[in-house]
Every structure is written in C-alpha cells, then in structure tokens.
Amino acid sequence: MLSLNNIGVICISQALQHSPKLLAIRQLLSKASSRATLCNNSITFSSKGTRRHTGFRLLNESIVKHVSSLQTTFCTACVKLHCWNCSQSIEQTPAFFCLSCNFVQPPDERASYFLIMECDQTFALDTQRLQKTYLKLQRSLHPDNFSQKTAKEQEYSEYQSALVNKAYRTLLKPLSRGLYMLELNGMGIEEGTDAGADPLFLMELMEINQALDEARSKEESAKIGASMKEKLKDLTEQIDASLHKGELQAAKALLAQMKYFANIEEKLLSQGHQTAKQQSLTQRLLPTAQSLATLINGSLVTLNNATLNNA
C-alpha cells in the first residue's frame, strides 16, 4: 500500500464547499473496516461491498499536512495483517505476538511510537507510565528470551526490541518528543543556527555560553544549570499549549529554542562529569603520592644519616 505522504492529494474544493460530501468522506475515513486503494491522484474506498470514488487534487498546504498527519492511523487501520507462522488474522496494532500461536511478529514500521508505547499522542505524557510500558515490553521481547527459538523468531525479536528502545528514547525527553510530533505532521527543524532567530535570543545564548566558559566553581555552574532547568520547564509548558491548540509553527519556534537550551544543559552535564572524573582520579592517586612522599622522605633521612656517619 502506498503511503499518503507520497501522494499530495486532498479533497476537491467542491467537496469542501458541500458539507454533506465532506461528512461522507470523513465517515469513510473513520471506519476501520474500510479499505483504500490509492492510485495516482485518486482514492477508491470500499466498505461492505459498496465502492465510492472521490477525486483528489492539491488545494493548499495546511490541508495536505492534515492529510499527512492521518497517515499512520489511516494506513494501519486499512491493512489486514496475518501471522507469518499460523496465518491467523492479527487484529491489534501494533502486534508484538500472535494471539493464536504466540509467535513473535515482525515490527510494524507504520505504527507511531505513541502506539508502540501505549501512550496518548500528547506532548505532556506520563513518563512514569512510559517507563513501565518500556520495561514490560522489553521483558517479553528481549532477544535473550528467544535464544532457543527459530532464526526468524530471533530476528523479529531483535527488530521489535530495537524499535521499542528507539520509541522509548524518543518519547522520554520533551525535546525529542516534540520534534517527533512535528515530524508526524510533516515538519522539522533544520540543523545549525536559525538565521531567522530573534537577535535578542541569540545574544542571550552567547551570554550564557560565555558565563559557562568562565565558570570556575561548582556554585557558578550550578547557578547556570538551575537557570537552564527553569527555562526548559517554561518552554515545555508553552510547547504543550501550542501543540494542544494545533499551532504547529509556534511549537516549532519554541522547540528550536528548547534545542539550544538543551545543548547548554548537556554541556553543563559534560563538564560536571569531567570534573567528577578528575576528582575521582585525584582521590585514587593521592594515597599513592602520599606513600611515595613518605618513601622519599625516609630515603633522604637514611642518606643524611649515612653521610653524617661517614663524616
């Protein structure tokens, strides 16, 4: 089945102007039993033996993005899956195991990370619940559980386990979670410095980085770290509100700011780890240095005594 991302199509303007037709299309999309065959610039729906053909063409960018956002849910609902081992129909999505033979299934790449981790598709998700789901899935899908199984089961368990890991890491942190939600809506943030960023914001970043480079004590670094936590917390709340309202451009701008502040926070953590390593190394070497100093002092005393005796 072709991906809706590959088809720049939306309902014809006439369908949008006449609400009964638009309602009929929406009802068709909402039925899980409906099947869709995508061909060039048209979609043919069939449900319970009835076929409807609706023309599609590009109207405007906002509607195309809305259609794109329906990709995962729509496609997953329309495709009928069967177990590779017993050929029984698999109703749940995503399917980790066949309910009939209990064999592990290949991963469904179309399923969103929210579906995989059994989470609502929202920015303000419950991370504790996310972690519990992750541990539950890994207990059943970890490749170690399939070491005595067939080669295909071992292969699928590795794929499923890796997909769960990726989904968990993506949804765990607000930044990666927000970027993924933008990706689901066909949007992204370019790498590098944003040429359109607010000059005052860029100046603020320069001042923070300069203060971080000049920090000479734990207290100074801790103060900058506390400031970053507050800024990230405030941005998280603003991004949640923007995504909840469907204001994707506003959310994108806020996520770009969060990305900068998250980089500074990682730099702080890196410096903290480096300082901790240096302190740990000093603590390990200190007894050795003290022992060497004692040995040298003892040798000097012995040498002095021998010199005095010879005199």
Image (cartoon, grey):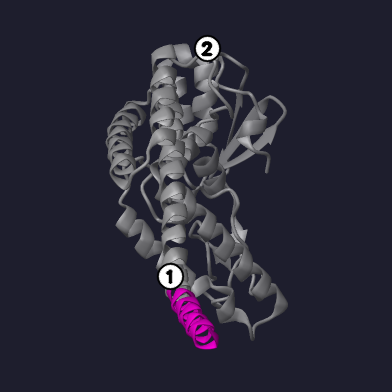
Task: Identify which residue is drawn at 72% across, 28% down.
Answer: 40
Foreground mark, 2 or 1? 1
Which of the 4 image quadrants contains residue 39?
top right
Type of the residue with mark 1: Leu
| Helix, strand or loop under label 1 | helix
Q: Position of residue 52 (x, y in %)?
A: 58, 31
Q: Nearer the viewer, residue 271 or 133?
A: 271
C-alpha distance separating marks 2 and 1: 81 Å
Say few, some or many: other residues with alpha carbon within 10 Å of mark 2 (under 14 / 14 to 19 / 20 or more).
few
Q: Main secondary structure of the magenta part?
A: helix
Q: Which residues are magenta?
A: 290-311
Q: Which residue is mark 2?
A: 14
Q: Position of residue 100 (x, y in %)?
A: 53, 75
Task: Identify which residue is drawn at 45% across, 31% down.
Answer: 260
Q: Nearer the viewer, residue 151 or 300?
A: 300
Q: Which label sits on residue 286? A: 1
